[in-house]
Image (spheres, rainbow, N blue to C red):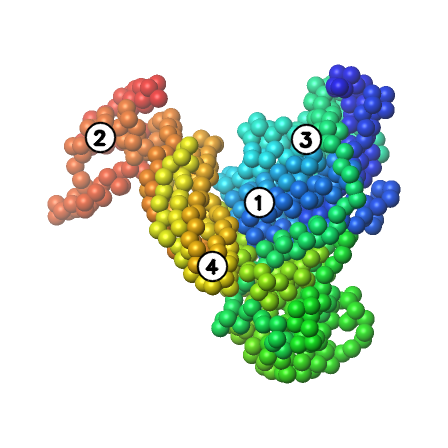
Amino acid sequence: MTEASDLTLEEKASLTSGADFWTTKAIERLGVPSIMVTDGPHGLRKQAGASDHLGIADSVPATCFPPAVGIGSSFDPELIERVGAAIGVEAAIEDVAVVLGPGINIKRSPLCGRNFEYFSEDPIVSGVLGAASVRGIQSQGVGTSLKHFAANNQEHDRMRSSSDVDPRPLREIYLRGFERVVKDAAPWTVMCSYNKLNGVWTSEDPWLLTSVLRDEWGFDGLVVSDWGAVNDRIAGIAAGLDLEMPASGGRTDAQLVAAVQAGELDEKVLDVAASRALQLVRRARERPAVAGPLDADAHHTLAREAAGRSIVLLKNEGGILPLVPSQKVAVIGAFATEPRFQGAGSSLINPTRVDAALDALREVGGDAVSYAPGFAVKGGAIAASGRSADDLRDEAVAAASTAEVAVVFLGLPASQESEGFDREHIDLPAEQLAVLDAVVAANPNTVVVLSNGGVVALPFADRVPAIVETWLLGQAGGGAVADVLYGAVNPSGKLTETVPVRLEDNPSYGNFPGEFGHVRYGEGLLVGYRWYDAKDLQVTYPFGHGLSYTTFAYGDATASVRDGDIVVTLQVTNTGDRDGREIVQAYTSLPGSLVQRAPRELKAFASVAVAAGETVPVELVIRREDLAYWDVRVERFVVEGGEYVIEIGASSRDIRSSVTFALEGDAVRLPLDMNSSIGEVMAHPVAGPVVQQALAGLAEPQDAAGASMMEGDGMEKMMASFPIGRIVGFPGIPVTREQIEQLIAGANAQG
């Protein structure tokens, strides 16, 4: 087994950068092979043929599963783990050592062009689902690369801008999901992001890559750069960046060698990075041989199941859905035949096949299903036909007017959302909205089916009876849409992000995408639904919302402690006549908290299958550590004691049951000094009684007529924030500065 001590200085340095775009360097002298890493995360993007200098050549066929924006709406770790295992199998067949994913960055703004690769605006959802993906892929002996670490929440100027985030939101919102995945699933690698974090490149931030990631969280794998993220290789390796990708042509290897020889870099630092690279190679070589070829049909079936579970039924007024096969249905919209099923950029998969919704709908409805494109999508077949927008709209109106139900497919073209740039607005294309308006006028029984990688405004939400959010569903999405529309699959997906009424309501508005290389995270802790709830803003659809073709009733919740965590139990009953699946959500709050908190925060969830008419028990485990806030005074997570309110809901704004639970908090004892407030001193177990006695005889201030200027506990409230060292010399307080100093010293000595 090769160790770093077996390597020459030059060989050590060689292991810390790529051989080309996708592979690491081999050391033939010692039998250390090169290994391959490839893009993911919702399928394998292994480049066909030799690695080109940009890594954007054609890739081998692979199953395109629903991207995170879609499958995240399943809220189902078990499903995501199964999809991850399938991706791991495909990677193993192709002899890929590491799949570059999952991405779990927070959806801070709906404008982020890469939101389709991320799970949620909530860190618990991102962490739980990200861990499931890692477990699934790595169960096949293939590594993962958790990305993008950290605070990479936009594409604009992503390779230079600084994400300026205060300590509490950084820890509680933007790092919490990463911590969950690292501790729960142990990814083989973590990928640092392009951006700076509070002015420091993440690729050379020892606090982020070593103090937090390794020392606090216990990460024992390899840190790899995002492709082209390295700013200063010597500073990076000293900070904990082990592998630079892609290849630098030997340039940065030579820099490391020269730095060691000049005494500017301790060779032990290089030893550590080389050891981690060797460990990654060993892990890859330990994978058992996997026999091919790929069972493409089985994986497509899984992709269809996952897509069906990803669909969110936003509205279903009058029970217009599910459709009946005998109904005359007009399918309108180019996306029905030219599906938008994945995002653009580095995660672009070459699918083994692609299902179109129109074909799948006709398999059920036959000749009762008509079609009119309605509009053209740039680069699509309809656009190439040269037909005018007026002709396409008139044809759509004619089809809708003779149908019982019109199903209109709307969405965002790939040109409007992609890795590399952010969106400018959240509106659907005007020509699509014009077609919808005309169709609704011709046939009010209109169902809207959306295809989009990021949130879109829904100005028509109160004018159509049904809206189906399909996000991006992968290669089997067309079949899954037909399954849901015709009721073969009961929709169960729920929103992992809020749908705002307008962009201006979003918490990042005014602080996105920043200016002059800095973006200020001015909304602090109030990201996503936390903001909308705290500001009591109207939303189009709230976080966690999603309907079913059946209904569910929630029983009374109870709470208890198990191994330090809070366990919430309740009964959920399917009160309808269809089997279904409900996503039960647990939110917490702490009235009277010492620190700022959102009105409610998601802390646990469960996806539960419930047959028609049946009642099932549901258990939600709220980890004690997830209740903690980041205390900036002591720079650690602290659980505040008190009466927590636990709300069980079908969404963040559909609370069905609640229970209070008293929790003992963590002790936080700050050293006292002369500027400690009287309130802080009085709360101290040693100093408090002494000060209480000294202040007991303090007379309340009076006005000229002799009346008290303080009522009730007004004096106590006023003095609570008064620095203890400044009461010296106050009338009626017989205490000297020396006595206060002695009191403080004694209190600090006793803890």
Q: Is residue 3 above or below residue 283?
A: above
Q: Position of residue 679 (x, y in %)?
A: 29, 35
Circles 4 and 3 in contact, beta carbons < 8 Å: no
Q: Which residue is mark 1?
A: 78
Indicate the amino acid at tag 1.
Glu
Q: Which residue is mark 2?
A: 692
Query: If you read the primary sequence from the N terminus, does the residue marked by circle 1 or circle 3 appear first?
Result: 1
Instruction: Identify the mark at residue 612; answer none if there is no mark.
Output: 4
Q: Callout 4: helix, strand or loop? A: loop
Instruction: Identify the mark at residue 222; answer none if there is no mark.
Output: 3
Indicate the amino acid at tag 4.
Ala
Q: Position of residue 414 (x, y in %)?
A: 72, 60
10 Å crowding of disc 1: few (<14), some (14-19), many (20+): some
Give the distance between the C-alpha atoms of the residues marked 4 and 3, in whole angstroms: 48 Å
**Closer mark to the observer between disc 1 and disc 4:** 4
Q: Position of residue 443 (x, y in %)?
A: 59, 80
Query: If you read the primary sequence from the N terminus, does the residue marked by circle 1 or circle 2 appear first?
Result: 1
Give the distance between the C-alpha atoms of the residues marked 2 and 4, in whole angstroms: 63 Å
Q: Callout 1: helix, strand or loop? A: helix
Query: If you read the primary sequence from the N terminus, does the residue marked by circle 3 or circle 2 appear first?
Result: 3
Indicate the amino acid at tag 3.
Leu
Q: Callout 3: helix, strand or loop? A: strand
Q: Is residue 164 above or below residue 732?
A: below
| Residue drawn at (68%, 30%) of the image | 222
Q: Is residue 457 above or below residue 508?
A: below
Give the distance between the C-alpha atoms of the residues marked 1 and 2, in whole angstroms: 57 Å
